[in-house]
Image (cartoon, helix red, strand yellow):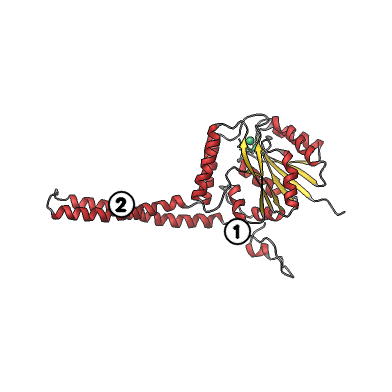
Amino acid sequence: MGELKRISIVVPVYNEAENIAHFARSVAAVMEPLPYAYELLFVDDGSRDRTREILMELGAADEHVQSIFLARNSGHQIALTCGIDHADGDAVITMDGDMQHPPELLPELIGKWEEGFDIVQTVRLTTEGASLFKRLTSKYYYRLLNLLANVEIQEGGSDFRLMDRKAVLALRRYREHARFIRGIVGAMGFRKTQVEFVAQERFAGRSKFSLHKMISFALDGILAYSVQPLRAAFYVGVLSAFFAVALFLHVLFETLRGETVPGWSTIVVCCAFFGGMQMMMLGICGEYIARVLQEVKNRPLYLIAQDNRRNPTENRIAAEGREV
Ligand code: UDP
Ligand code: MG
């Protein structure tokens, strides 16, 4: 038998002091019997409670437990990115540390990976104890997102997933700041499959996503994957141009009948015409901004799933001028 394959489990945590010990025990109970080497990599997202101390204790007691401490609270998606950047497993699993992503699902994710899938995405069917508000906003948000964005983003998709190392290397090449990781992974390609689950209630504590954080996350999702809002000005402009022409005909008609106040025709037609022109120009600017946005994000142009040349040269990094 060769060396065991390595699994990295990446867990961003923010003020989860009451959860992590229980979570780490549950993960260990599931992972220990499996024939894999594994690391449980916590990324402490600038917690202000006892999370740090507890992670140090857990690490001292169990060599599987590793942690990285961020200097400040940088948000779930950034903490997740840090973990993905530093995980060295053959497969990397990302999950939350509050027991809402059940550790019992880990063997199933790994099983799918062994079947040959590069990305095993979980889909949350329902969340036990979730408020009506959270359920409805989540549902309609994904509808809106799919309507606006040209990439399919799974309703109920979460950041609980397994990625093969090659998908991880691909994901690491996306360095955009406003990150919506489920969108990036959704658009990445590779061999994908899904596993469904029912999210449990949080083991302890409250959600770390304030309404403010949720709204900015939701905006990131739309703005990172859609330039439709920018394009809207152009369509409105075209519509108002049509409106201006119709209005012009109407004004012409009224003027010929001689039933207008002097000056009225010019003002009305000018307003409609220039309003339409401004909207259209805004739309054109929007198109440029959309392209600037795309270039600034500097996403990789392509991702290679497999290099099947006889003598693959290692020029991938040199060609792109940056580390993966
Ligand atoms: N989290 C984080 N940084 C933050 C907010 C949350 O690392 O700024 C972590 C949190 O500790 C948890 C995961 O991200 O492990 C998901 O957060 P939470 O459970 O609060 O979100 P919800 O399940 O309510 O959507
Ligand atoms: Mg949670």
Left or right of 243 on screen, residue 265: left
Residue type for callout 1: Pro
Say what secondary structure mark 2 lies in. Answer: helix
Q: Position of residue 12 (x, y in %)?
A: 67, 40
Q: Residue at x 53, y 51 (%)?
A: 225
Task: Quarter of the image for the C terminus: give it.
Answer: bottom right
Mark 2 burial class by Cα count in 10 Å: few <14, some 14-19, many 20+? some
Image quadrant occupied by the N terminus = bottom right
What residue is at 46 percent from the left and 52 percent from the top? 228
The percent coordinates of residue 32 (x first, y second) are 82, 41
Quadrant for ligand 1? top right
For this view, does 8 lie left or right of residue 224? right
Q: Which amino acid does label 2 sit on?
A: Gly
Query: Looking at the rendered structure, which numbered label has been put on residue 300?
Result: 1
Which of 75 and 235 lies nearest the eye of the viewer? Answer: 235
What residue would you read off at disc 2? 275
Q: Mark 1 CB in 8 Å range of ligand 1?
A: no
